[in-house]
Amino acid sequence: MPTDIDGLPTNRAKIMVVDDDPDLRQALSLRLRANNFETVNVCDGYSAIAMAQKEKPHLIILDLGLPAGDGFSVLKNLQQYPALSVIPVIVLTARDPEGNEKRTLEGGAVAFFQKPADNEELLGVIRASLQAGWGWRRGLPS
Amino acid sequence: MRRLCERELPALVLLDLNLPDSHGAETFRRIRQKAPNVPVVILSGQDDEALAIKAVHMGVQDYLVKSDVTGKQLERALRYAVERQGLLLALEVTRKQQIEFKNRFLSHVSHELRTPLTCIHQYVTLLLNGLAGPMAPDQTDHLKIVLKGVNQLHAMIRDLLEAARADSGKLRIQPRCLDVGELIHQAVAMMRPSADAKRISLEAVVDHKIPLVYADPDRTLEVFINLIDNAIKFTENEGSIVVRSALVETDTTAAYLSVSDTGRGIASEAHPQVFDRLFQNPNRVDNNRSGLGLGLYIAKEIVTLQGGRIWLASAPGSGSTFSFTLPLYSLAKLLFPVVTHQGSMRKRIVLVRTELTPVSKALRGGWKDTCEKALEILRQCIYVDKDLVLPPLGTSGYGEAFFIVASTDMERVGILMDRIRAQVGALPELRASGTLRVTAEPIPGLPAADPRTLEQQVWGVADHVTEIIQQGLSSKQDFTEKENQANAN
C-alpha cells in the first residue's frame, strides 16, 4: 500500500466522482471508500467545477455524458483555474474510446476507461495518478 | 478523349470505343475515372459488338450498333440511359445512408446498453468483494455466474460495434514490428482460466526463429483470443488446444499462426460460411450461450486488413485448426538505401536505442500519446540521408524502445544522441511522467573483402539488427514479468 507522499498518505486522498447516474455514483463511492479514499459526489458539469473549487479534491473521476456541461467542457473549465488544472482527471464513460479517448487525453485527462471498467485496473490508475500528481505538485513553486 | 476530359461534364456520353487517342475498354475506363456519374452509351460497329457487351458489364448503360440505329431509337436509348443512371445513383446514396444509419444506431445502442450493464457489474463485484458484508459460499457461487453472464454480454456488445466498424471500413489498424511469440504467450495467459475451467490443456508452441512481423498488436491479440475462445467453446472437457507459430519454406513473406483443438470439428459443407457474420457452429459441445457469431468475421476482417489470410482445416470428429498469416517485416528492404552507398556497404553502422520508461505503469492512455510525440521528435533528430528510424517495436506494454539505424561514425552518433536527449527531454509530459535512456551499439563492421553480394551483406546487417532488437524486447518482457511478480507479492 503506497503511503506518505508529501506527508499525505495516499490512502486518505479525496476523490470527486462526477456521474449523472446515481446508482453508479453510489457504487463507485462505496468501492472507493472501501479502499480508504474519501469521496465527494457530483451529478452534473456545472456542479463539478463549483464543487472542485470548494472541496479541492486530489483526483476527479469524470463521466463524459453529463447534464449542464458535458465532460469535455468540465475538462476545459478545470484548465481555466490554475489550482484545479493540476488535479488528475480520469475519464470513465460508456462512450467509445475511438475519437473520445484521444480528445479527452488532449483535453488534460490522465487516463480513459470505458464502462464497465475493471475495478482493480481503475484503482491501480487512481493510485498511480495520485502519486504522480503529488510528485509533480511538489516541484511547483509555492 | 483528352478534350472531353478538360471540358465541363456533359449530361451523357455517346461513345465510340475506338478514338484516335484511346481504344476499346480502356476508353470507357478513362471516362469512368473522369466522370463516374455520367451515363455512357456506346456506339459500336458490328465487328466489336462483343466488346460493347463486355462494356455493359462494366457499367455502360447501353450500346447501339451503328448500322442498325435510327433517330427515334437513339433518342429513346439516350433518354433511358439518363433515367437509369439517375436511379443507380439514388440507390447508391440510399445504400450509404443506410450503412451510416446502422452504424450510428449500433454505436448509440451499445452506449445505452453499457450503462445498465456497468451498474450490474459494479454492484455484483461490490457484493462479491464482500464490500456489502460477508457472503455465504452459495451466494458467492451464484453471483459468480451473474458476473460471467455480464462479461459475456459485455463481449457481445464489443463484437457488435467491431462488426459494424468492419462493415463500414472503419476498422483501424496501427501496425508495429512485433515479436509474435510474445503475443501468443500473452493470449494464452489471458485465456488460461477459461481453459482450466474445462480442464482443457492450452499450450503455446512458438518458433523462436520467426523474425518480427508487421501487425497491430491489439488487433492481432484480439484475433488470437477470438480463435482460442472458440476452440475452448467447441472442445470437450479434458481436450487440448495448441497455439502455434511457424515459418513455411514456400512462403518467405509471412509468419504462419494457428490454433488447433481436439473438438468436434466442422463439417466441410459449413466451411465456406464459417467466416460469415452470424455463423453458428451446429456442432457445439455444450448448449452454453455461444455468442453472436461475429468473432470469426471480425478475425477475418482484421487479418485481411493486415495483409494476411485466414482459413480453416477441420473434419467432424477430428478437431479444427484455424490458421492465419501475418506479413513478416522486411528490415533488409528498409535498410538497403541507408547502409549502402555508391554500390558498397558503408563502413560503420550503429544502432541507437532510445528507451522511454514511465514512472508509473498506470498512466496508459496519456502514455501512448507521449510515445507518438517522442517518435515524431526522433524523426526530426536524424540525418535524413544516413539514418533510419525503425517503426515502433513490440507490444508497447510497459515503456517503449525506439531504434535508429545510423550509418555514421560514433562521433556523429554522439551528437545525434545529445540531440535526442535534449529534444525528447524538452517534452513536459515526459519530464513529469517518464525517464529516458539513449544508448548506442556499433554493429560489427563487415570485412572489406567480403565475397558476398551487396544484398547478402545488407541481409546480414538486417539479421544482426533484428537479433539485437529481439534481445532488447525479450529483456523488456522479463522486466515486465518481474514487475508483475513484484506487484503480486
Image (cartoon, rainbow, N blue to C red):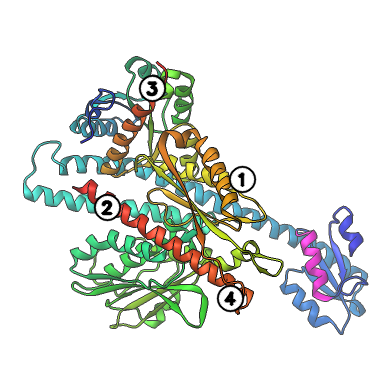
- In terms of sequence position, does the residue under pointer 2 or pointer 1 come before the other? 1
Q: Which residue is mark 4?
A: B456
Q: Are marks 1 and 3 on the same chain?
A: no
- Please, what secondary structure does the residue beneath circle 1 have? helix
* CB within 8 Å, label 4 to label 3: no
Subunit of label 4: B
Q: Are marks 4 and 2 in contact (CB under 8 Å)?
A: no
Nearest to the observer: residue A17 or residue B92: A17
Q: Do we see residue B209 in this rendering?
A: yes
Q: Residue furthest bottom?
A: B47
Dot 4 crowding, Cα within 10 Å, few <14, some 14–19, many 20+: few
Identify the residue at image location x=48%, y=55%: B164
Q: Amino acid at mark 4?
A: Gln
Q: Please name the residue that numbered disc 3 is placed on.
A: A48
Query: Which amino acid type corresponds to the residue marked 2 in the rendered image?
Result: Lys
State how many labels appear.
4
Query: Residue tagged by mark 2?
Result: B482
Measuring 29% from the left and 54% from the top, which residue is drawn there? B481
User: Magenta segment, which residues?
Assistant: B24-36
Callout 4 and callout 2 share a chain: yes
- Along the line of sight, which residue is nearer the eye, B432 or A34? B432
Q: Nearer the viewer, mark 4 or mark 2?
A: 4
Mark 4 vs mark 3: same chain?
Answer: no
* Residue B179 position within the rendered picture, expressed as x and y whole percent measured from the top left: 42, 63
